[in-house]
């Protein structure tokens, strides 16, 4: 982390803070939905070659 951000800070304004927090919660919810729908797995076949692939759990 950069030393430029270390120190004491004072709140100047909290204008639109509620909207900002709602947007962050929305992004977090969407991220969780995306993470739960896509799975990545690795497996080996009989010849011991790596076979990798994506499994789309969203039905697409």
Image (cartoon, grey):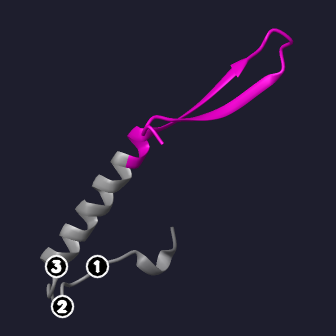
Q: Which residues are magenta?
A: 34-60
Q: Which mark is residue 8?
A: 1
Q: CA distance from mark 2 to mark 3?
A: 12 Å
The answer to whether residue 57 is above or below residue 3 is above
Of the two numbered discs 1 and 2 in the rendering, the one whose residue sits closer to the viewer: 2
Q: CA distance from mark 1 to mark 2?
A: 13 Å
User: How would you rate the neighbour count of disc 1 (Cα within 10 Å): few for under 14, some for 14-19, many for 20 or more?
Assistant: few
Task: Identify the secondary structure beneath mark 2.
Answer: loop
Mark 1 and mark 3 lie on one chain; the one further toward the N terminus is 1
User: How would you rate the neighbour count of disc 3 (Cα within 10 Å): few for under 14, some for 14-19, many for 20 or more?
Assistant: few
User: Residue at coordinates 48% horizontally, 42% vertically from top-left?
Assistant: 60
In depth, the one of 7 and 11 nearer the eye is 11
The answer to whether residue 36 is above or below residue 50 is below
Q: CA distance from mark 1 to mark 3?
A: 20 Å
Tell me residue 35's x, y (percent).
42, 44
Tell me residue 38's x, y (percent).
48, 40
User: Residue at coordinates 23% horizontally, 61% vertically from top-left?
Assistant: 25
């Amino acid at each position: 982390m950069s030393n430029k951000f270390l120190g004491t800070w004072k709140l100047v304004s909290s204008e639109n803070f509620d909207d900002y927090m709602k947007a962050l919660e929305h992004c977090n919810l969407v991220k969780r939905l995306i993470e739960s729908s896509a799975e990545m797995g690795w497996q080996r076949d009989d010849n011991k070659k790596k076979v990798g692939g994506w499994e789309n759990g969203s039905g697409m």
